[in-house]
Amino acid sequence: MSNDIVIEQLTSLETSLEELATVLVQVVEDGASVGFLPPLSQEEAIEYWRSVTDPEVLLFVARLDGRIAATVQLQLCGKSNGSHRAEIAKLMTHPEYRRRGIARMLMLAAEEAALEENRSLLVLDTREGDPSNLLYASLGYQPAGRIPGFARSADGSLDATMIYYKNIG
């Protein structure tokens, strides 16, 4: 096993649908707050990924030894008053591949792509207390606010979300 991590932007999902779905199912099963509750079937996850196809969504994956280990989306704002901004969404790393710096690499790739798209402001949200809060802070994202009771967890409780922003240009 070489442990070579390759970051790439996917322009077609068809050949990667199964792997993307597996990552989504695994992170949801592991408790990640990415918009889904367990149990999430492979078929539901595939349908989600099919819905992501949009010219304003740039999808990045990290491959480790050829397998998709993680993914993130850069959602470009298509509104005329928002052409300077984009949203970071659905950063997820398969549980087997965590703590290797892969999410950081994906975030940096998304930021670089945002600059190439002439975006100067990035926004994102994440469940309060998740490890991702530390990652975003370490990358220079600033907290903009907290919304209590924003997302339902698998146990039925309602969790707060933190909204972050970063000026990149």
Image: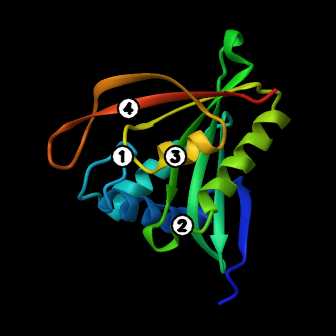
Q: Which is more N-terminal, label 1 or label 4?
A: 1
Closer to the camera in the image, 41 or 141 = 141
Identify which amino acid the numbered label 3 is placed on: Leu
Give the vertical position of 46 relative to 159 (above or below): below
Q: Gap in Å between the C-alphas at discs 2 and 3?
A: 12 Å
Give the label, 3 or 1, closer to the camera: 3
Q: Gap in Å between the C-alphas at discs 4 and 1?
A: 10 Å
Identify the residue position indicated by label 4 in the image: 161
Q: Position of residue 62 (x, y in %)?
A: 65, 64
Q: Which is more N-terminal, label 1 or label 3?
A: 1
Q: Which is more N-terminal, label 3 or label 4?
A: 3
Residues under numbered marks 4 and 1 in contact, where contact means CB atoms less than 8 Å apart? yes
Q: Gap in Å between the C-alphas at discs 2 and 4?
A: 22 Å
Closer to the camera in the image, 99 or 48 = 99
Q: Residue at x 32, y 47 (%)?
A: 36
Identify the residue position indicated by label 2 in the image: 99
Label drawn at residue 75: none
Label drawn at residue 33: 1
Label drawn at residue 134: 3
What kind of element bears circle 4?
strand
Q: Position of residue 92 (x, y in %)?
A: 50, 55
